[in-house]
Image (tube, rainbow, N blue to C red):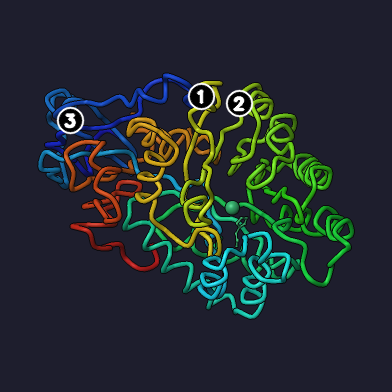
Amino acid sequence: MGDRIDLLVHNIGRLVTMQGGSGPRTGEEMTRVGEIRQGAIAVADGKIFAVGEEAEVRAQIAGMPVLRELDARGNLVTPGLIDSHTHLVHGGSREHELDLKLKGVSYLEILAGGGGILSTVRSTREATEQQLYAKAKRSLDTMLLYGATTVEAKSGYGLTLADELKQLQVTRSLNESHPVELVSTFMGAHAVPVEYKDRADEYVELVVNVMLPEVKRQGLAEFCDVFCEHGVFTVEQSRKILTAAKELGFGIKLHADEIEPMGGAQLAGELGCISAEHLLAATDEGFAAMQRAGTVAVCLPATSFNLRLKTHARARRMIELGVPVAISTDYNPGSSPTESIQLVMTLGCLNLGLTPEEVITAVTINAAHAIGKADTVGSLEVGKQADLVIFNAENLAYLPYHFGINHVNTVVKKGNLVVSEGNLVYEAGK
Ligand code: IZC
Ligand code: ZN
């Protein structure tokens, strides 16, 4: 590195770098976005070579050939957005549940009746790897068009060894062929499959003794996650699975206290989970346990919106108590059928009460920490990957303010131009 610049992004009106600090941002730190006026970014070998005020960057690269220039036209540039919680790979869709929802049937009632997640399990088991790949690729393209350059993807719609491996294999193939970088999470404990109805403990044994070791052996996931919820997996079952996962070397995550207060947040803190998700019903004791462990709270405001819940995650309280907050789409065919991280940014403001600065922190550096990727992505700093977005907007507040549409103009992933003027421009197979 150092003899030429592959890409120079210049004329950046406001450059949100997210520089500063090492761990996930908490409290007041969530408002410090490291904004630079009249900025520029120089990229070499897919990494950031220089970033700062344009005059300084130009001085640093003086004499070096610049192979390509991108004019940001005075607009806003941020790090590539990070969607830290999705159920990307699945078969089918669940629009038939909309009518039930309008009639007041709850998410857990639909699941208890054999629908919900279990309906997607049937569609996923029926689908071939190629069909799952094609569907997930379309979603990933949409995520990229909306500015996401790194995405976490959970399994959990197979619920047999073979079908879980099939889903995870699709994630691996997509990660190898699509510009969006994927972080894979094994979530065999997403629901108790019908063939184990009333035998959840036996299913937990299968997850612990058969699925986890095989997923590890094949290197198909970095993280393990569990849906700890009434009628799904208990705190004790969740503890058992995550403890086994930790022993095998997986990072651990937990869907905690989404609907009922179960003590999930406490468990996440106690076990040292990297993140705990949802948390609508989590108590202050739960937040305190997470704070002590440095567990990132991944709030999912599109889910509470879509489930028509009267309450939302208490993100302001989390920030007050020193819990780092990330927000994510929770993209899935049931509780959150949207790929738009920008919609989530709006809901993060309007329904969680986060400021635009806290929101961008929650979809960049804190999201990177939630998936163990903060050493390479989540901020624009020398040596990190050159993942960035140029918006058709002049400032941060404009993104959540003008809602429901796509503000992305250009996306660069690892120094490559992948979205230009709002269109995908990556080469297939890259
Ligand atoms: O398919 O409903 N909450 N898992 C936990 C989900 C939502 C996904 C789904
Ligand atoms: Zn989820």
Taking the image as shown, residue 275 lies to the left or right of residue 146, namely right
Query: How far is the residue under mark 2 from the one under mark 3?
Result: 33 Å
Q: How crowded is mark 2: few (under 14 residues within 10 Å), some or many (20 or more)?
A: many
Classify residue 193 as left or right of residue 291.
Answer: right
The amino acid at mark 2 is Gly
- Pair 2/3: label in front: 2
Please report the residue visible at 53 percent of the width from the left and 56 percent of the height from the top. 307
Reply above or below: 112 against 355: below
Q: Position of residue 89 (x, y in %)?
A: 55, 65
Q: Mark 2 points at which residue?
A: 294
> Is any atom of residue 383 visible in this view?
no
Mark 1 highlights which residue? 23
The secondary element bearing badge 2 is classed as: loop
Residue 382 is situated, as x and y percent measured from the top left of the image, at: 33, 29
Question: Considering the numbered disc 3 on the image, is that residue within a helix, a strand or a loop?
Answer: strand
SS for tag 1? loop
53 displayed left or right of 380: left
Q: Would you place residue 126 above or below residue 140 in this image?
A: below
Q: Please state which of residues 165 and 111 is positioned toward the viewer in this rendering.
A: 111
Q: In which quarter of the image is the C terminus?
A: bottom left
Upstream in the sequence, badge 1 or badge 3? 1
> Where residue 263 sits in the image (x, y, percent)?
74, 36
**Residue marked by disc 3:** 39
Circles 2 and 1: CB atoms closer than 8 Å: yes
